[in-house]
Image (cartoon, grey):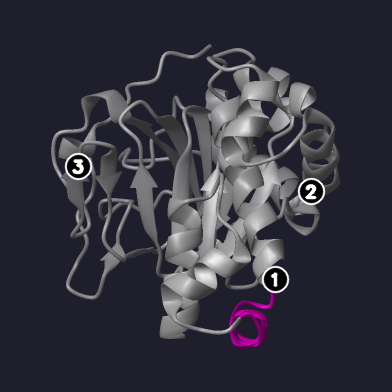
Amino acid sequence: MTAVSAKSARDLPRTDSSGLVQMRQNTDVAAGTYAFDGDTVVLGVAGGELGRDGLRTGWHAHDLHQIEYSFHGTMGVETSAGRYLLPPALGAWIPAGLPHRTKIANRVKTMSVFFDPAFVSHTDNRVRIIAVTPVIREMIVYAGRWPIDRAVSDPDTDSYFRTLATLVAEHLDAETPLCLPLSDDPLVAAAIAYTDRYLAHVTHPAVCREVGASERTLRRRFLASTGLSWHGYLVQARLLRAMTMLAEPTSTILEVAVEVGFESLSAFSRAFTRQTGETPSAYRRRATARR
């Protein structure tokens, strides 16, 4: 693997008054990378704050398209549309100009590849979580020798990044649905918060009692606000938390299934495979490979 000098939050570019992060440091390079090592987080960035569980950035946008890849640990991206999970072996596509904020755990090690918008056209304005194939992964690793804040570029380097951008673009339509919706309905937002807090044992009647609504009212408003039923949200939230746990092989798959709220391993495996297209054991092998 190429040796990459990873930066901490001390070194992260700051936002300007409009919330736009200029990654190129006043150079004209068309693409480049930014390595981040969560082990060395010391300061907040982009109006963010540092807590025990890592760094939370403030709302900001980049002037370039971005593919974020986590070598180790799980991070999250939030936009006005919802919360996205980025476990190892997957990448987050964040288009240029999209306001977002990021939660980065202390142990996360990531690589971001930034592309001039001209490199990937016809992309809509939303985050997508995509599978990072072995070829894309190795290209991301190799690209680490060309940081985005370097002074100059050359035609061969630009050609390399154009090829990588093309490969990434081909996977944008095969995204992995790892997004939890948000809601500006206060009742639904309270129900989401309570569900997340008691994910393993929560029930629909308990949520209704907590937010002071009938089961029928919550069912109707939850679906209208998020596009998901409450039960659909619950299953998706449990699977996302399971993916985070599976990426850290300290628990058995059965222990993960029980801890996130599934009654049996078979039920967990069926739901996980239906959602992600692979079994929990296959995902764990991929997520923990070549750390």
Q: Secondary structure at mark 2?
A: helix
Q: Nearer the viewer, residue 223 or 171?
A: 223
* Badge 3 or badge 1: first in the primary sequence: 3
In front of the other: label 2 or label 1? 2
Q: CA distance from mark 3 to mark 2?
A: 32 Å
Most common SS among magenta residues: helix
Identified by mark 3, the residue type is Gly
- Residue 287 sits inside the magenta stretch: no
Question: Does residue 178 show up?
Answer: no
Q: Nearer the viewer, residue 59 or 118?
A: 59
Span shown in magenta: 215-229
Q: Secondary structure at mark 3?
A: strand
Q: Is residue 9 above or below residue 118?
A: above
Q: Secondary structure at mark 1?
A: loop
Q: Count residues near mark 2 (Cα–Cα under 10 Å), then give few for <14, some for 14-19, many for 20+.
A: some
Q: Which residue is mark 1?
A: 122
* Image coordinates for residue 98, horizontal then vertical, percent: 46, 69
Q: Count residues near mark 1 (Cα–Cα under 10 Å), then give few for <14, some for 14-19, many for 20+.
A: few
Identified by mark 1, the residue type is His
**Image-based side of 269 in relation to 209, left or right:** right
Q: Which residue is mark 3?
A: 51
Q: Which residue is mark 2?
A: 275
Q: Which mark is residue 58?
A: none
Instruction: Kindly indicate whether the residue at mark 2 contacts the one at mark 3 (C-beta within 8 angstroms).
Output: no
* Image coordinates for residue 275, horizontal then vertical, percent: 79, 48
**Image-based side of 163 in relation to 146, left or right:** right
Instruction: Kindly indicate whether the residue at mark 1 contacts the one at mark 2 (C-beta within 8 angstroms).
Output: no
In front of the other: label 3 or label 1? 3
